[in-house]
Amino acid sequence: MDAFTTIDRLKAALDQHRPLAPAIVANLREDLIVRWTYHSNAIEGNTLTLRETKVALEGITIGGHTLREHLEAVNHRDAILLLEEGIAKNEPLSEWTIKSLHQLILKGINDDNAGRYRTVNVRISGAEHLPPDQLVVPELMERFITWYRDEAGSLHPVERAARVHSDFVKIHPFVDGNGRTSRLLMNLELMKAGYPAAVLPVERRLEYYRSLDEDHVRGNREPFLGIVSDIVRDSFQPYFHALSLPWNGISTD
């Protein structure tokens, strides 16, 4: 059974139980926001633990951590809330959406560059891929949105989410915050299509970076699509647990 077939069977099983009870939805959402924020920030070097991230989101300052790390947690949570608003309004993906999410990611951290495309050339530490010249970033972002509007709809939602993530981060349109923004955009696509948000665990960071390089440098999309498929499949597990459904009841082989 291929990955998309497994994922579609999981979604069909979950859909049979929708709408979910409000208490289940609230509990899953709270857990998701903390895990998503922790892992996405940890991938970028934030040292708050999962428990510390939860406390920071409750407004409590954690000793031994920088103001930036606290802001990264709060900002990421606020970006998720904005993303949810856009989904509720059925807003299409646009450059405005992307810049608005990014503006929240860097709020109070780098206000000069928050929500603004980079005007300098950058390198990605440890990556083979060299992002394009800053002069072509606006054109590439226009082309990205055109591709999304005209072609992305024909892809399976999981493949579309992976392509949005990878193609966006290949352009690397911002000075900082591209990774967090790309993972938000990936989940924007998944959630709009009725899938749970998928959290990329920090433990897979090295594999994640390697798969992106494989895509960006050699044009091989399969490793990255494989990772995204894995985490989308795993994203159903909390729902099955909350509903007391047997996780092994649907083959994930």
Image: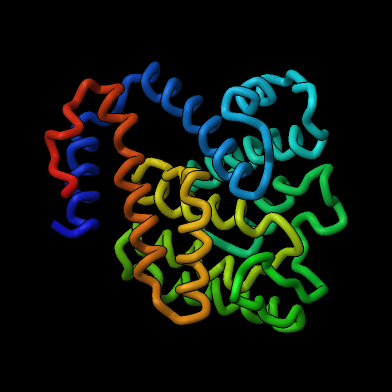
**Position in image of residue 92 (x %, y %):** 51, 58
For the view shown, which residue lies furthest in the right direction? 112
Q: How is the image coloured?
A: rainbow
Residue at 42% in and 45% down: 198
- 163, above or below 240, in the image: below
For the residue pair 18 and 162, the one nearer the viewer reads as: 162
The N terminus: image quadrant: bottom left
Residue at 31% in and 30% down: 239
Left or right side of 165 for 193: left
**Position in image of residue 193 (x %, y %):** 36, 51
Left or right side of 122 for 88: left
**Position in image of residue 82 (x %, y %):** 61, 42
**Position in image of residue 138 (x %, y %):** 70, 77
Residue at 87% in and 56% down: 112
Residue at 18% in and 55% down: 5
For the residue pair 61 and 80, the one nearer the viewer reads as: 61
- 214, above or below 230, in the image: below
Q: Quadrant of residue 195?
A: top left
Left or right side of 6 for 170: right
Left or right side of 235 for 32: right
Count of residue discs: 0
